[in-house]
Image (cartoon, helix red, strand yellow):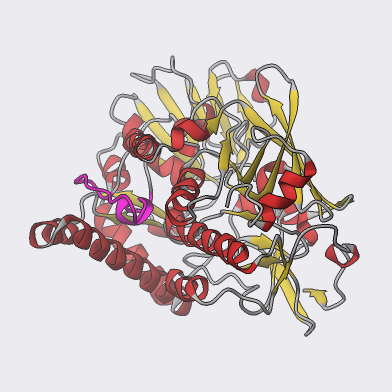
Amino acid sequence: MGLASTDPLGAAMANSGASDVAHVDVLIVGAGLSGIGAACRLQAEAPGVSYAIVEARGASGGTWDLFKFPGVRSDSDMFTLSYPFRPWTRSKAIAGGGEILGYLRETAAAFGIDAKISYHRRVLRADWSSGDARWTVTIEDALTGARELRTCGFLYLCSGYYRYDEGYTPVWPGQERFAGRVVHPQHWPDDLDLAGRRVVLIGSGATAATILPVIARDAAKVTMLQRSPSYVLAMPATDPIAGLLGKLLPERPAYRAARWKNARIATVIYGFCRKHPARARAILQKAAARRLPDGYDIAAHFTPAYDPWDQRMCLVPDGDFFAAIKSGKAEVVTDHIEEFTPAGLRLRSGAELEADVIITATGLNLLPLGGIELTVDGDAMAVSHRVVYKGMMLDGVPNMAFAIGYTNASWTLKVDLVARHVTRLLTFMRDKGYAIVTPRLPSREMVTSPYFDMTSGYFERSRAVLPLQGDRAPWRMWQHYFKDATLYRGPIDEQNLEFLPAPRLATAAAVAPDPAIRPR
């Protein structure tokens, strides 16, 4: 896209006096799985578009660089978590965090993306000017606190949806009296040795299910304390069908076939669970019972109060979680914490759990759009009042997209669809002579609901700061890869997107509340 006079986005920026160093056509925020993939797509499919990546942390990889807890791994298969343009060629379908991090960094290096990343650069705010058709982005040096301004024609937020600096930990009575060590998995200490120690692992989600079988190998005893159960489903760590396809087909066709198969299976399972929750619950309970000791109390410890996929399901490779319990090295206790004691925990039932180390796998804190303050022509944009367009843009906010993956399937399936669509959108604008694109709500009344329709604690705690979704496409989130693939690959939407040339445009309508929105 560049800054040539034939490019409206670039020309508007050139006229503003911004330097080549300070300005890019696209500024990508975040150098994790989403940001690296977005840069690869831009570079390959929109040649001439200038871009840069800013990353708040000191290394690339996002989640896979941050999380260091034992056993950290993907709970999606690598044939769908990897990029379709860079096939996963290793044997494991479920890979460890280190393998995934290596794959991401190898991809960035292979495409020259790593040279485009500026580290320790935290975006604080972004101010849109319709008159200049640009964003002015305030960036803080995370090491020194110094601030700088950069400008871009299009802002692409690829920072995920949770806070990197702190996880969620409830406040429990007496916690300061505990004589042992309390650890949150999001900040796992390098010096933590659990050999021969009594460990209480608080939580019932994917993180707890991942940590338990690994630490149970060396710890004297591991007790997973859950307030309420989650659904846990065993899955093969190695995909035998993918292995067979690899023997019968060339590398790329074999990868595409495995990716399609796994995406389809995940979609079918999710659809079955939502359509037949009672049958799905029974199947999951029977599957758990087969892997646990005879007579194990499935009703108490593996029967959630919610339906399957009301919250994200815990997928455990080769049933390692169940195997640790069956071996006697780990146990599950379902109860509430009354208080911490010097020796461990006192539960509501009156029981006490002794512990040398308590691990609080209690979840994440969400931070929509990286916590960046947004303004449009001087007016603050409250993210919670905006409706999401195609799961990637906000109504009334020009030239901005974000990447958030699926909650019921692989993250990459969704963010790669978004990356390709953003690339097509920018190419369309260049070819048509447009500088500004803004999603506009339809005139027909639309009922809104929360952006995420899951009941997980971290979503429930963050309802007030998350955007909304509508009641119909393209404002509705389907959480369905194949429906989304059709939606994203269709013609550029000139009905719900407003396109304008540069420069100097009237902007009063850009932030005006739309009477057609009726909160549910």
Q: Position of residue 440 (x, y in %)?
A: 75, 71
Establish if 400 lies above or below 207: below
Q: Residue at x 76, y 55 (%)?
A: 383
Q: Residue at x 82, y 76 (%)?
A: 518
Q: Residue at x 47, y 43 (%)?
A: 36
Q: Describe residue 360's horizontal placement relative to residue 97 as left or right.
A: right
Splitting the image into 4 quarters, where does residue 442 fall? bottom right
Q: Which residue is outermost to the left?
A: 247
The overriding secondary structure of the stretch rendered in magenta is loop
Whether the magenta-drawn stretch holds residue 88 is answered as yes
Q: Describe residue 322's horizontal placement relative to residue 358 as left or right.
A: left
Q: Position of residue 311 (x, y in %)?
A: 53, 59
Q: Residue at x 51, y 42 (%)?
A: 203
Splitting the image into 4 quarters, where does residue 64 fall? top left
Q: Which residue is outermost to the bottom?
A: 444
Of residues 171 and 347, the one nearer the viewer is 171
Whether the magenta-drawn stretch holds residue 220 is answered as no
Q: Position of residue 452 (x, y in %)?
A: 62, 62
| Residue 461 showing in the rendered view | no
| Residue 375 showing in the rendered view | yes
Of residues 94 and 394, the one nearer the viewer is 394
